[in-house]
Structures are given as structure tokens and as C-alpha cells.
Image (cartoon, rainbow, N blue to C red):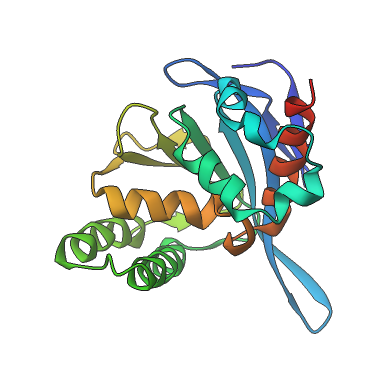
Amino acid sequence: MGSEMVMVDDIPFPSEITTTKPLSLLGHGITDIEIHFLQIKFTAIGVYIDPEIVAHLQKWKGKSGTELAEDDEFFDSVISAPVDKYLRIVTIKEIKGSQYGVQLESSVRDRLAADDKYEEEEEAALEQIVEFFQSKYFKKDSVITFSFPATSNVAEIGFSSEGKEEPKTLKVENGNVVEMLKKWYLGGTSAYSPSTISSLANTLSLKLSK
């Protein structure tokens, strides 16, 4: 674990985590909605990526963070770059795991349907994810993780609450569903958290200018 912490809305995120190799915190943000002029924050998000991703994004050298944040082709390249990616999502406002699962399911399903990729296998893979979250309760500071290894098109979803990691993780092996999970959080202008996309764009713009 990197010793430095980055505060995202008062929630500490390590500046580095190690999966098969060290990954850097390249973007962070929150998910929120506004109700009657009140901002309600749901989660804080940290996006960890192998710093070697910069080698795969040279085409965008010299672009500003603002330009990159609006460039979906750039984020397609971020998603498809063959490097490890890892999402760490921390609960700010407690909700039932089933609520999160349903939200994830409908967003991923809509994306799959739009690309004509929603078949029985995808439906079954999504059901597994919904089931995984069904019994969980996201207390404040619970952590959801999505690990996307470089070498294979799978995802591993983990959950921990009150500092206790649940030993059971969920492996998602349907490539289409995995791709849309990445797009839900990293898909440029259509992603779930605009603040995270903006942060990621700014960091990568800076790294590309070096």
C-alpha cells in the first residue's frame, strides 16, 4: 500500500495499490444527485490504473484535460488499453446492496441492448452480480472493488464493510458485461460519475504532456 493518502470528499484513498503490480490513483470523484438544491452524495470513487497506460494513449499527447473529458474515443482507448485497472468505491450515504445492484444492472443492460449484445449469457451474468449485492448492506465507508486484469476480459468484484473484507468475491466472466462495467465507470461522457471522468482526464493529460 502506498503510504500517501488522497482525500476524496473526506474519504482517504491510498495513492497506490498493488494488484499484480503497483497501480496509481489516476482519477477520483463522487456519485451524487441534486434534490431540491440539496446535493446528496452516494459514493466516492478512486480509479487505479497501471501508469504504463500512458504508452497506449500517445495519440492524445498535448490535449487538455477538458478536451479529453469530452472525447469518448479517448476513454474507449483507456478502457481497451491492455493494462490492469482497479476501481475502489466507498459508500458515503448508506444504501441497500440491492439498490446498487439494480442500478448497475439497468445501466449495464441498457448499454448492452444499445449495442445489440444483450443475450441470455449476458442476462445470466448480470443476475449473478445482482445476487452478489442482494444480501449486502452498504453502511457508510463500505468498500466495493472492481478489479479488471490486463490479460483477460474478466472482472472480480469484492466487498468489505466495517473494515472486514468478505472472503467471497464474484468473478464475472462474460466479456460483454465486463466491458460495460468498465464503461459504466470509465466511459467518458456517458459514465456514471462526471467528476471522476474529469479528474482522470486531467491527470492523464498531465502525464501525456511529460
- Residue at x 68%, y 39% (from the top left corner): 27
Q: Nearer the viewer, residue 27 or 78?
A: 78
Instruction: Name the residue at 60% across, 55% down.
Output: 72
In terms of image quadrants, where is residue 40?
bottom right
In the rendered image, the vertical position of residue 111 relative to residue 92, given as above or below: below
Above or below, comparing residue 205 to residue 40 in the picture: above
- Residue 5 appears at what percent x and percent y? 74, 26
- Report which quarter residue 192 is drawn in: bottom right
11 with respect to 80 (left or right):
right
Q: Where is residue 122 in the image (x, y as percent from the top left)?
A: 23, 61
Q: Which residue lies furthest to the left in this view?
A: 120
* Quadrant of the drawing holding the N terminus: top right
Residue 166 in view, yes or no: yes
Q: Residue furthest bottom?
A: 36
Q: In this view, does 183 lie above or below 86?
A: below
The answer to whether 122 appears left or right of 98 in the picture is: left
Classify the position of the C terminus by image quarter.
Answer: top right
In this view, 72 is above or below 199: below
Whole-percent x, y for residue 84 in the image: 46, 28
Numbered disc total: 0
